């Protein structure tokens, strides 16, 4: 009878394991990093508070459906971040929480954006003067004849908070190569009196840190980032600045007053737009 019950439990366990495996397969991030991300989120949310003992290796192994060595790798990643501490004979305890001060509010208008980055400390990681052109979509402007690629890391209080990958039109870059390689390019472009920015396309998405971004921002591989794609087109509809920016998850916020342009709102029916045939 006991054998039958054990076999029945095993059969019910198989679908769950397949479901968990399918979840891991959706991402190219190593499984141990995915496990670490879930545990990190539990610490961030307060599910595990500082001083709490986390689940045992056996419990985590069963919950995540992975080998014990994978659990240990995930725990080691969080230990290196100062979030977990193993105590011999007692288990693993939460020793800290991720830093989140959310000081960076992504600008929703051009002037505020330029003003917010003027004082950023910029350190160049890579400059490629014979770069292939960036990919731009319909309505984002025309490609310039040539581009220079610049990768930089921006710092706040000695801590990296964003990685900026910019394709800058060569004719703009050549106006002052030295300054463009040591300052925020968008702030310099805003000072060019003979350049008129006619379009500034900004798209915000949620991404994950690839190996290079993780290294530059001191993040764990596969941790979430706030990603911004920003394209500036000039008076000739040429995309002179095409940037992909990756923000550290701990500094990013998007705050806005939804009634800023509309003023106070009193109760009234919401008019739904009719779908076109």
Image (tube, grey):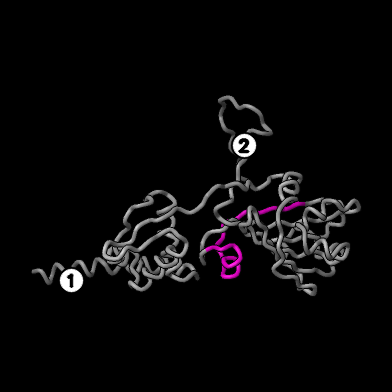
Callout 2 secondary element:
loop
Mark 1 crowd level (few <14, some 14–19, many ≥20, 10 Å Cα)? few
Q: Is residue 142 above or below residue 44?
A: below
Q: Is residue 203 magenta?
A: yes
Q: Find residue 2 and report its horizontal and vertical position in percent.
A: 10, 69
The residue sitting at 85% across, 62% down in the picture is 172
Q: Find residue 81 and report its horizontal and vertical position in percent.
A: 47, 61
Dot 2 or dot 1: first in sequence order is 1
Callout 1 secondary element:
helix
The residue sitting at 67% across, 31% down in the picture is 262
The residue sitting at 57% across, 58% down in the picture is 225
Mark sitting on residue 7: 1
Q: Is residue 84 magenta?
A: no
Q: Toward the viewer: 22 or 100?
A: 100
- Foreground disc of the pair 2, 1: 2
Residue at the extreme right of the image, as rendered: 194
The residues bearing labels 2 and 1 have C-alpha atoms spaced at a distance of: 57 Å
Q: Which residues are magenta?
A: 200-219
Residue at the extreme top of the image, as rendered: 266
Q: Is residue 79 above or below residue 114?
A: below
Residue under numbered circle 2: 258
Mark sitting on residue 195: none
């Amino acid at each position: 009878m006991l054998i039958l019950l054990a076999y029945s439990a095993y059969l019910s366990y198989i679908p769950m394991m397949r479901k968990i495996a399918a979840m891991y397969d959706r991402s190219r991030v190593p499984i141990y990093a995915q496990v670490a991300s879930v545990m990190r989120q539990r610490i961030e949310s307060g599910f595990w508070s500082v001083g709490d003992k986390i689940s045992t290796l056996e419990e985590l192994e069963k919950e995540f459906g992975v080998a014990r060595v994978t659990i240990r790798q995930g725990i080691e990643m969080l230990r290196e971040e100062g979030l977990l501490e193993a105590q011999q004979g007692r288990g693993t305890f939460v020793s800290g929480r991720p830093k989140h001060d959310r000081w960076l509010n992504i600008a929703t208008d051009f002037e505020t954006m330029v003003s917010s980055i003027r004082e950023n400390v910029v350190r160049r990681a890579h400059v490629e003067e014979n770069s292939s052109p960036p990919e731009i979509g319909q309505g984002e402007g025309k490609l310039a004849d040539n581009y220079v690629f610049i990768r930089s890391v921006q710092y706040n209080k000695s801590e990296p908070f964003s990685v900026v990958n910019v394709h800058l039109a060569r004719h703009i870059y050549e106006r002052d190569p030295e300054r463009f390689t040591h300052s925020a390019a968008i702030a310099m472009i805003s000072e060019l009196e003979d350049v008129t920015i006619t379009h500034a396309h900004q798209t915000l998405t949620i991404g994950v840190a690839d190996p290079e971004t993780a290294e530059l921002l001191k993040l764990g591989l596969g941790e979430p980032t706030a990603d911004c794609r920003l394209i500036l087109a000039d008076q000739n509809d040429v995309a002179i600045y095409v940037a992909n920016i990756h923000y550290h998850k701990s500094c990013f916020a998007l705050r806005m007053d939804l009634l800023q342009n509309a003023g106070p709102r009193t109760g009234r029916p919401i008019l739904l737009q009719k779908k076109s045939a």
